[in-house]
Amino acid sequence: MISALPRIASALAPFALLALSATACGTLATSPAWVGSGLEIVAPQREAEEEASAERERQIIARQPTEIGAKHILVMHAQSKSKPPNVTRTREEAKARAEMVLIKATKGENFDALVNEFSDEPGSAERHGDLGVFDRAQMVKPFADAAFALQVGQVSGIVETPFGFHVIKRTE
């Protein structure tokens, strides 16, 4: 019987390793107390920051008028939404063109003349880029945010929307 012990021990060795690894895995599955505690602190902070940011935006919007009037110059590119078939420039070329228009507009060049020369929006030349009076909901968010932040007579920076690059001038 004593001579059989080494054979039994060697036969049971793989099972002993299995038992040890199961115990080790079980130990690893239970995390130390400090693991995960960061989420309990960070998530509410992030939520509070997002809520504070949303509240700041609501306050800015509340101070702005409900309707304004504006004109704009729209420089489109090949990927622009609702573009006419003759617009084939790249996004980079369109942005460079919009930057040139912005420089001319901020130097005081006649906005109506710039609309007639540079705007790709169909019918824009006949209206001199005039959008009439509108509320926030009528425009895409980036356009509305920029337009409503302007003072009467002020020209925006370049505003990108799915339609292309805009230079906006508030009229009322």
Image (cartoon, grey):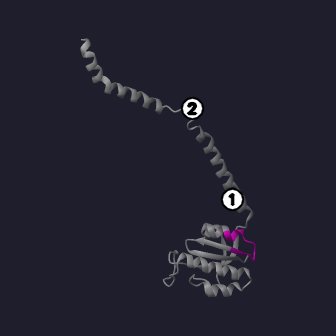
In the displayed structure, would residue 145 be above or below residue 82?
above
Q: Which residue is mark 2?
A: 33
Tell me the quarter of the image containing the N terminus.
Answer: top left
For label 1, the SS is helix
Please provide percent x and percent y for residue 154.
74, 75
Structural crowding at the residue carrying mark 1, measured as other residues with C-alpha within 10 Å and reported as few (<14), some (14–19) or many (≥20): few
Mark 1 = which residue? Answer: 57
Q: Quadrant of residue 26?
A: top left
The residue mark sitting in front, 1 or 2, is 2
SS assignment at label 2: loop
From the viewer's perspective, tell me whether residue 83 is left or right of residue 114: left
Query: Could you tell me which residue is drawn at 58 percent across and 34 percent down?
Result: 34
Decide which of tag 1 and tag 2 comes sooner along the chain. 2
Q: Is residue 149 above or below residue 42?
A: below
Whether residue 126 can be seen here: no
Residue at 68 percent across and 73 percent down: it is 157
Report whether 15 appears left or right of 109: left
Q: Amino acid at mark 1?
A: Glu
Residue 29 in the image: state x and y as whole percent. Answer: 46, 33
Q: Residues within 10 Å of mark 2 (few under 14, many from 20)?
A: few
Residue beneath the point at 56% across and 36% down? 35
Q: Quadrant of the C terminus?
A: bottom right
What's drawn in magenta, residue-wise? 146-156
| In magenta segment, residue 113 | no
Q: Which mark is residue 146?
A: none
Residues 6 and 22: in front is 6
Q: CA distance from mark 1 to mark 2?
A: 39 Å
Q: Nearer the viewer, residue 13 or 51?
A: 13
Q: Which of the 4 quarters of the picture holds residue 56? A: bottom right
What is the quadrant of residue 163 in the picture?
A: bottom right
Q: From the top left corner, tell me how far across and down residue 156 is, in percent.
A: 69, 74
